[in-house]
Amino acid sequence: MEARYGDGSNAGQTDWTPYQEFNKSFKPDYPNDTIVLTPEFLDALRDGELVTLTFHFYSGEKLMYHVKESGDSATGTRVTPAS
């Protein structure tokens, strides 16, 4: 997973690279077919700033989401590419 703020800077616990660590920042929830962002990752985000997450899969597919952490809650929206 890649994580970047709107200005292009790196977001998350590993701030020297946009690529975040599997099972430390995010992990799959196979039974529910979802990806879970860890509390540690969310706590490392700057409060109220939009973050673009790009998930890279072995198939070559990429999925993008916008996430914003604010106080004790986080919201996210899937980004649909323009056609």
Image (tube, helix red, strand yellow):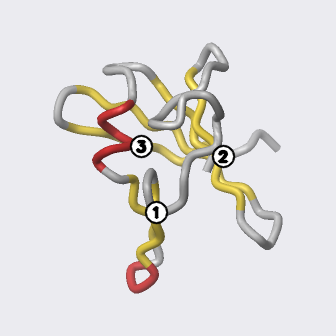
Please, what is the three-letter code of the amino acid marked with disc 1? Answer: Asn
The residues bearing labels 1 and 2 have C-alpha atoms spaced at a distance of 26 Å
Q: Which residue in the protein does label 2 denote? A: 80
* Residue that lies at the very extreme toward the bottom in this rendered image: 31
Q: Residue furthest left?
A: 72
- Name the kind of residue labelled 3 in the image: Gly
The image shows residue 15, relative to residue 31, as above or below, that is: above
Left or right: 2 in relation to 24: right
State the residue at coordinates (40%, 86%). Answer: 31
Residue 60 percent coordinates (x, y): 82, 65
Q: CA distance from mark 2 to mark 3?
A: 13 Å
Point out which mark residue 11 bears. Answer: none
Q: CA distance from mark 3 to mark 1?
A: 19 Å
Q: Are marks 3 and 1 in contact (CB under 8 Å)?
A: no
Residue lying furthest top in this view? 7
Please identify the quadrant where the C terminus is shown.
top right
The reply to whether callout 1 and callout 2 are in contact (CB within 8 Å) is no
Quickly name the residue at label 3: 76
Tag 2: amino acid: Thr
Residue at 47 percent of width and 34 percent of height: 12
Q: Are marks 2 and 3 in contact (CB under 8 Å)?
A: no
Query: In terms of secondary structure, where does tag 3 sit?
Result: strand
Mark 1 vs mark 2: give the one in front.
1
| Residue 23 - label | 1
Q: Residues within 10 Å of mark 2 (few under 14, many from 20)?
A: few
Q: Is residue 68 above or below residue 81?
A: above
Please state the horizontal and vertical placement of residue 41, each as a whole percent of the image. 39, 43
- Determine whether the residue tagged by mark 2 lies in a helix, strand or loop: loop
Residue 74 in which image quadrant: top left
